[in-house]
Image: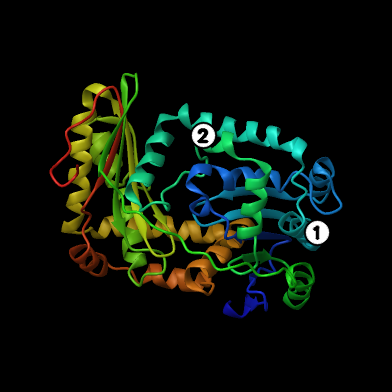
Amino acid sequence: MTDSIFSHTFENGLVLAAHRMPWVRSAAFTLLVPAGCAYEPAERAGLAGLLCEMVQRGAGPRDNRQLVLDLDNLGVERGEFVSAAHTGFSGTAPAENLEAALEIHADVLRRPHMPADQLEPARAVAFHELRGVEDEPAQKTVQTLRRRHYAEPWGRSSQGDLPGLRAAGLDDLQSFYRQRYRPDGTVLGVAGLFDFDRLRDVVGRLLGDWPRGEAQTVEEQPPTARYEHLPYDSNQTHIGIAYHTVPYSHPDYFQAWATIGVLSGGMSARLFTEVREKRGLCYSVHASYHTLRDRAGVFCHAGTTAERAQETLDVTLDELCKLKHGVRTGELDRLKSRIKSGLIMQQESSTARGGAVARDWYHLGRVRPVEELQQRVDELTCDSINAYLAEAPPTDFTVVTLGPEPLEVPSGVS
């Protein structure tokens, strides 16, 4: 169905990428704006998230309440997020309401009110989210792991920190808005029932004359210590382990992705079977893939008791290192079944597909048809995966622990 995938780049750099799904009655969109937390001033950590909250508190002809009511009346199921690279806005609605929903979001991007009397309520929301992380030791462990693993500023947490949130004022928000809310670098992904020619014209009318921004660069600082312990008064210990892998755009991505599926992705996966089921070392263990445009990482987490924390760390690292010996046919067969099930679900969901369309364009400069994804999965073999693992085995681990006592980490992780 490659003939149902469309794209158009406007003169100001804005990209519209779309997948027409005539078998659904909904339409979904994802807007990726190049206003991620990696672009914040270091002393204003959390600024991108605070701005994301503020731009939705009234825009264009609508005040805060009317904007929410109008989206609700259109039946728009919506969300927003901040990542290292982007601030994202998404929505799903009946297909006939897509244009109206995009019109409101165009106002959010281009004509936000950012009223002064809404700054403190927005800051209170940011404080609440930040404190929520402090109350979730697993999330705090993984956030610290990402910060340790990636070069600064790509590992930053979107929640920021208390000093940064307290210091942020309207001038900071307006300055960051002017710098980062811009069409060049913005991707609009749409999936569902629509006419592309009409959609392109609507987006052109709403966003085609949005002025470009000025070029900016990000200065990176390499990670320092590869092991960090976070003291935490508890009888539990949380363990985070990360290692580098290839990004989504890399030719070996599917092989790398498969190895993570063998590690984690069901009760038959290695980490669950070896660390939790057979040895009873922990109550939770999993691994996940995270990609930026030019780098990526595998991030593992295990939650255990303080008494069994050292053994849990040792056994988990051992299972990661064993990957270099390759995967087995049965593991690959189970993995393919899970992946194909996920692809079928994506085909039936305009929401999932809209997000995938936007992400594909950002990472690849094109949209992968679902048929191509299915073919790449079908083509996976143990030989191709094992050849990749022989060339790029898990190594150079970054470790973060949170609990009453630090743990002993192997040489090379310090």
Residue lying at 16% horizontally and 57% vertically, measured from the top left: 325
**Image quarter hosting the N terminus:** bottom right
Identify the amino acid type marked 2: Pro
How far across and how far down the image is residue 22, in percent? 70, 69
Residue 216 position, x and y percent, is 52, 64
Residue drawn at 48 percent across, 32 percent down: 133
Dot 2 lies on which element? helix
Q: Residue at x 21, y 52 (%)?
A: 396
Which amino acid is tagged 1?
Asn
Give the camera-side residue of 17 and 260: 17
Q: Residue 198's quadrant in the figure?
A: bottom right
Q: Nearer the viewer, residue 160 or 348?
A: 160
Residue 374: percent from the left, percent from the top? Answer: 45, 69
Q: Is there CB contact under 8 Å for labels 1 and 2?
A: no
Image location (x, y in percent) of residue 96:
81, 62
Total marks placed: 2
Q: Which residue is mark 1?
A: 97
- In the picture as drawn, the residue positioned furthest to the front comes out as 171
Q: How is the image coloured?
A: rainbow
Q: Residues within 10 Å of mark 1 (few under 14, many from 20)?
A: some
Q: Is residue 273 visible?
A: yes
* Residue closest to the far left: 411
Q: Is residue 266 visible?
A: no
Instruction: Using the image, determine if residue 364 lies above or below residue 344.
Output: below
Q: Which residue is mark 2?
A: 163
The local secondary structure at tag 1 comes to helix
